[in-house]
Amino acid sequence: MLRYIRSTLLLLLLGVVSAAHAASIEATGQAFLVDGDLGKAREQAINDAKRQASLQAAAYISSTQQLSNGILEIDNMRVSTLSTIRDVEVLDEKLFGNKLHVRIRAEVEVDTACENGGSGNSFRKTVAVSAFPVEQPAQKNLGGFRHIDSLLAKQLVERINRHPNLSALNAGHLQLQNPLSTAATHQLDNGALTTLMRHSQQLDTQYIVSGVVRDLSMVDPSVMQEENLFVSTYNRLDYKSDKHLRNFAIDLYIHDGFSGALIDQFSLATQGRWTLQPNQQTGFATPAFYEQAYGKAVADLLKDAAKQITEKLRCMPFSARITAADSNRLWIASGQRSGLKVGDKLSVYRKSVMYNPSGPATTELINTQQTLTISDVQATSASGFIEGSTSQHNIQIDDVVIFW
């Protein structure tokens, strides 16, 4: 009977957590006026207000749930996060110096369900998106896709940043996967295999997205190699034929930014008609590129990729690097932009590097059993206090705080 009651209580809690909640929210966004472009500043301020509205709509329940003597206890669990914003109404707009303030009212629906059965948290996580090198570089020639490596990262960053709980940074100038044929598996000098990403901590973000473009080829390569003028003309007129289909296939990898460990990976592929002449170069992700059926198919795939990335990271823990430690006070590299508020509580973990003579060095996070209570919040940083002392628990710069 007791087991039945416990199960019922847990199911009721999960029902509450996974439900979608709608609320009418008022929020203010800000943006700088650059070169007198009021329209662009207004758009940026409204987008900022939408992010703030989504954070405000996040439901806060307390943090660890547990059963004690058959009674469900809830303490300090912060839930939320996938949100849909609609019916946005601009209530007020004021210009103070070169900064525009816009106040909006919007209907925000928050869905707290995660695939793993848990609930995401409303903190805004950071993710760096690196270059997407092409496994067969010669395939970039058709259409003039020579800059696709970095432009693909830029396109993903733009789409990920439409999600209010992720802050994506463009690291498209960095190629983190090598060799491409076996990414994300790396071979070490001693012959061992690993999926750990080297030098991941240099990016100073919570998560890292990288990938490889596997295929940009035509399904029927002969279409682009036809020398007979009559046949070539016929092919152009027969533009709806499947012979004009072109492949687009990518592999994506999500790594933890602190340890370099591979969290998840998935592949996406699509096809679309490419009806331009072999010597016509639109470039990748240009207006002319997106006019093609192929470009539209790629745009849909990138939208799906961004959605899968955001859904995966939404349900991952929030973490932040410790930047300073003094007595019983800690400073961390996250603040208001991440959704932190005075009174928030985060667990403190000591970072330990384990050196293995026969394999790669690994990063281990050790729970200090200390809780950081935030007392001061700035735009990109925050500080607070722990009950013990930093020296007693050997808490140092580059250790981390985590909210599960």
Image (cartoon, grey):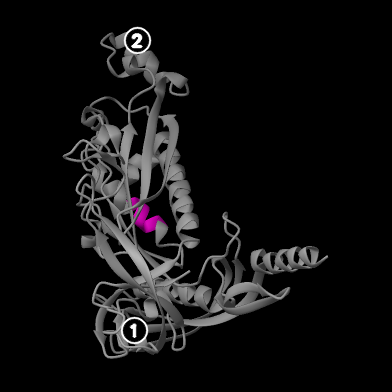
Query: Which kind of residue does numbered mark 1 sit on?
Result: Ala
Camera-nearest label, 2 or 1: 1
Magenta stretch secondary structure, dominant? helix
Foreground residue among 278 and 301: 301
Of all residues shown, which one is farthest toward the left? 189
Q: Quadrant of residue 318?
A: bottom left
The residue depicted at 29 percent of the width and 68 percent of the height is 351
Q: Examine the rendered structure and indicate whether residue 279 appears above or below residue 107.
A: above
Mark 1 lies on a secondary structure that is strand
The residue depicted at 32 percent of the width and 90 percent of the height is 328
Q: Quadrant of residue 378?
A: bottom left
Is residue 105 visible in the rendered structure shown here? no
User: Does 41 sit left or right of 297 as displayed?
Assistant: left
In the image, the segment drawn in magenta is: 155-159
Q: Residues within 10 Å of mark 1 (few under 14, many from 20)?
A: many
Q: Examine the rendered structure and indicate whether residue 131 appears above or below residue 112.
A: above
User: Does 308 sit left or right of 287 as displayed?
Assistant: right
Disc 2 vs disc 1: Cβ atoms closer than 8 Å?
A: no
Q: How many marks?
A: 2
User: Does 100 sit left or right of 316 as displayed?
Assistant: left
Q: Quadrant of the N terminus?
A: bottom right
Magenta residue check for 90: no
Q: Position of residue 140 (x, y in %)?
A: 24, 33
Q: Quadrant of residue 21?
A: bottom right
Q: Which residue is mark 1?
A: 382
The numbered dot on residue 231 is 2
Q: Position of residue 137 (x, y in %)?
A: 22, 31
The residue depicted at 73 percent of the width and 73 percent of the height is 70
Query: Which kind of residue does numbered mark 2 sit on?
Result: Val
User: Does 96 sit left or right of 66 as displayed?
Assistant: left
Q: Residues within 10 Å of mark 2 (few under 14, many from 20)?
A: few
